[in-house]
Image: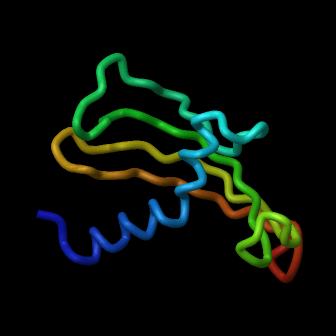
Amino acid sequence: MASFAAQTLFKLFFTLFSAFFIEINGEWKTPTAMQIIRLPNKTATSFGTTFMVDDPLTEKPKPTSKLVGRAQGIYAFASQSDLGLLMVMNFAFSEGIYNG
């Protein structure tokens, strides 16, 4: 059974990155997240399904806010029996004190 912290982190992950799934389904003209590995048969945990991301980082939550960098990385469903995620993310800032 997953701990409270793990469950909270998992919920936070999907709240923050829910836009990925909208983009993957083709509702946006320029997707910033793409499914790069698809499973031949869907399982309950989607083990092995992998996504690549290149999302804008903005000053405020609105997409029209000033761009300050990019969040680039990969995430995948990494457990065969439970719902587990593997995520590797690089934050490349183009503005502010962390530029470069």
Q: Residue at x 68, y 58 (%)?
A: 71
Q: Quadrant of the N terminus?
A: bottom left
Left or right, 14 with respect to 33, comes to left
Percent across and percent down for residue 40 are: 35, 17
In this orientation, does residue 76 appear? yes
Percent across and percent down for residue 61 are: 71, 73
Q: Quadrant of the C terminus?
A: bottom right
In this orientation, does residue 100 appear? no
Q: Is residue 5 above or below residue 64?
A: below
Spot the residue most to the front.
Answer: 27
Spot the residue most to the left.
Answer: 1
Nearer the observer, 73 or 64: 64
Left or right, 30 with respect to 77, comes to right
Percent across and percent down for residue 96 are: 87, 80
Q: Is residue 41 above or below residue 89?
A: above
Percent across and percent down for residue 84 are: 29, 52
Nearer the observer, 81 or 31: 31
